[in-house]
Amino acid sequence: MAFPAAFTVAADWRTQLQPDSRERIREIIMDNLTRRIPFSGEEGLQQLKKMAVSFEEKIYISAPSQLEYLRNISMKMLIMERKYPMTPTVNPLQTNATVIGEPTLNNQGRLNGEAPRRRDGPKRKRNTRTPLPEVFLQCFNEIPNRVSKFQEQSEADRKKISELSQKLKEAQIARDKACQECLLLKAEVDMVNRRNAAELKAKEDRIAALEEENSRLKKRT
């Protein structure tokens, strides 16, 4: 799937990003944090929320484009997923058996009849918000796959470059060896040519001497 042109334009991209879109991304980050980092009670939940806001805010400020904003968030979340495995569903350190990912809103709601309503409240609130554009969500969800494919392709390219470098070295060694053999062969040819030239000169001198001797004999007779 190709990214829309608007995602590749860096100029003034923050003015085009709706606040609800940022809030939705923060909720995704928060959900990932609550599933991977143990916390206790409302105070721990608020700390995770601050982490999610700071996480998104830093990338939002530094990203040069909307595409980089999404890519950097996805990369950070991938790193976090590898660094922090999924935590157990129930946190044994919590005295009220709070389920991770469904923190209580206050310390007074311990009645069994009240807890479900408190857990369901945030979900209903999230559903009333303006959803992210479909294309935005598709691009956001696709980034981890694209990053993974890019990493696989980069690794394959590195292996290919290493193989090509090895073949190039072998070719250079073979070339140098062939050049040495050519030089040796040329030296042998030159030596043979010089020897043949010397033998030919000796034969010519011998013939000239014989002809001169023959001429003297004819003059005597």
Image (cartoon, helix red, strand yellow):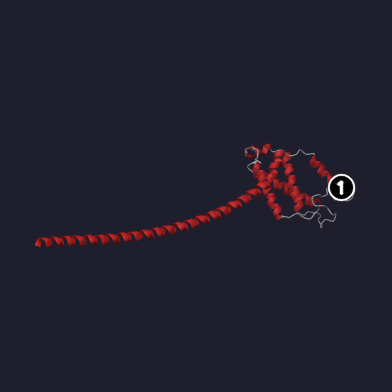
In the rendered view, tell whether residue 65 sits above or below residue 45: above
Q: Quadrant of residue 22?
A: top right
Residue 198 picture quarter: bottom left
For the image, the number of numbered tags is 1
Q: Nearer the viewer, residue 218 or 162?
A: 218
Indicate left or right for 97 with 199 as reference. right
Residue 72: tell me if it is visible.
no
Q: Secondary structure at mark 1?
A: helix
Image location of residue 88, percent across then percent down: 79, 55
Q: Residue 147: x percent and y percent?
A: 65, 48
The quarter of the image holding the C terminus is bottom left
Q: Is residue 57 above or below residue 207?
A: above
Please indicate whether residue 209 sits to the left or right of residue 118 in the image. Answer: left
Q: Residue at x 70, y 48 (%)?
A: 55
Q: Nearer the viewer, residue 71 or 218?
A: 218
**Residue 16: quarter of image:** top right
How crowded pointer 1 is (Cα within 10 Å; few <14, some 14-19, many 20+) is rated as few
Identify the residue shown where x is 76% and y is 52%. 35
Residue at 70% over, 46% down: 56
Is 163 on the left-hand or right-hand side of 132? left
Q: Could you tell me if residue 145 is visible in this image?
A: yes
> Could you tell me which residue is drawn at 61 percent across and 50 percent down?
153
The N terminus lies in which quarter of the figure? top right
Report the residue marked by disc 1. Answer: 116
* Spot occupied by residue 91 in the image (x, y as percentages of width and height): 81, 56
Q: Amino acid at mark 1?
A: Pro
- Residue reaching furthest to the front: 221
Question: Where does the image place residue 131, in percent across and percent down from the top left?
Answer: 75, 39
